[in-house]
């Protein structure tokens, strides 16, 4: 059997997916052990014991000033900002994407504007956002929204615009107006694509969040990483980066589950 025709079973897929991660962990442990054999005080590649020690204080010891557990406070602050930014972006992408996809005059009018905003590097707008909106939560959330919503809008609009024309004609033949076509025809078919767009936007959203927190914040995962880097505290930075990756993976799996659970017809080729 050719490799292109081989479909691994679920258990095999989990094993194959875990294998590269395990190899990277083994490689890291090997390199860290070598560095510590030459220099026991090495900070660049800390051993797991050093990471556990460095992280335990943030996990279990309240901060003397705030009285909060730093690790969980950082996580909550970042997830709150990310959740609000993703929520606003998803709503904007759904509404604007449907309108642009269904109504050609609106697409011709606003399409170039959306494209222009989408190609601007969002990080370049960060100083403008801080000047215009201040250093509070609004600017950080705005960076996430500006960074991912135009791309999501374009994706939803293109998907809706590519729906079979026969569906639109049949709906109009039955007396449907533009609003009914948007709600009854386009919306149900756009929802699986919307969840897919959110999944693809998770990575950029985290990048924009960490960037904003690193520049102007006093709490958050990105703030903590850039705070301890001046002390070369890789025993804190590496666990924080791994935690961010784990959170992103869990969010991605949750979105995949929701899509397959509520829109199984969109995943027919995978079952």
Image (tube, rainbow, N blue to C red):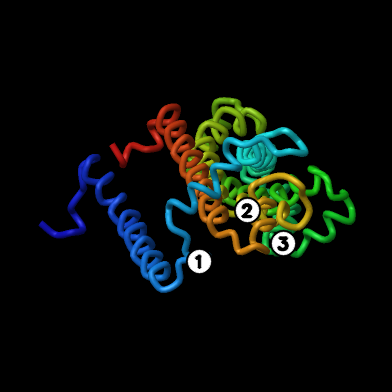
- Percent from the top left, x then y, of residue 256? 44, 38
Q: Residue drawn 64% across and 61% down?
A: 229
Q: Which of the pair 111/34 is nearer the observer? A: 34
User: Residue 151 bears which disc, if any?
Assistant: 2
Q: Earlier in the sequence, mark 3 or mark 2?
A: 3
Mark in front: 1 vs 3: 1
Q: Tell me how far mark 1 sits from mark 3, CA to CA.
A: 36 Å
Of all residues, the one furthest to the front in this rendering is: 40
Identify residue for label 3.
123
Q: Residue drawn 73% across and 58% down?
A: 117
Q: Earlier in the sequence, mark 1 or mark 3?
A: 1
Of all residues, the one furthest to the bottom in this rendering is: 38
Q: Which of the pair 177/116 is nearer the observer? A: 116
User: Residue 169 bears which disc, if any?
Assistant: none
Secondary structure under tag 1 reads: loop
Q: For residue 178, which quarter of the picture?
A: top right
User: Residue 41 bears which disc, if any?
Assistant: 1
Q: Are discs 2 and 1 less than 8 Å apart at CB?
A: no
Are there few (<14), some (14-19), or many (20+) residues within 10 Å of tag 2?
many
Using the rendered image of the protein, determine whether residue 94 is visible from the camera's viewpoint.
no
Using the rendered image of the protein, determine whether residue 269 is visible from the camera's viewpoint.
yes
Q: Quadrant of the C terminus?
A: top left
């Amino acid at each position: 059997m050719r490799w292109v025709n081989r479909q691994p079973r679920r258990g095999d897929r989990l094993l194959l997916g875990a294998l590269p991660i395990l190899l990277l962990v083994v490689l890291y442990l090997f390199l860290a052990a070598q560095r510590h054999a030459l220099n026991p005080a090495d900070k660049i590649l800390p051993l797991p014991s050093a990471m556990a020690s460095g992280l335990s204080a943030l996990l279990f010891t309240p901060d003397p000033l705030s009285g909060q557990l730093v690790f969980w406070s950082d996580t909550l602050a970042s997830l709150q900002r990310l959740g609000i930014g993703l929520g606003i972006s998803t709503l904007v992408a759904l509404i604007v994407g449907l309108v642009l996809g269904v109504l050609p005059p609106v697409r011709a009018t606003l399409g170039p504007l959306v494209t222009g905003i989408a190609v601007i590097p969002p990080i370049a707008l960060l100083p403008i956002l801080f000047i215009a909106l201040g250093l509070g939560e609004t600017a950080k959330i705005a960076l996430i929204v500006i960074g991912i919503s135009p791309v999501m809008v374009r994706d939803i609009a293109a998907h809706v615009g590519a729906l079979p024309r026969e569906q639109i004609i049949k709906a109009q033949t039955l007396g449907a107006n533009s609003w009914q076509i948007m709600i009854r025809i386009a919306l149900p078919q756009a929802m699986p694509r919307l969840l897919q767009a959110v999944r693809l936007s998770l990575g950029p959203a985290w990048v924009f969040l960490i960037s904003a927190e690193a520049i102007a914040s006093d709490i958050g995962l990105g703030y903590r990483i850039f705070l301890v880097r001046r002390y070369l505290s890789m025993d804190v930075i590496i666990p924080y980066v791994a935690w961010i990756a784990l959170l992103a993976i869990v969010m991605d799996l949750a979105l995949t589950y929701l899509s397959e659970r509520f829109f199984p017809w969109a995943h027919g080729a995978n079952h």
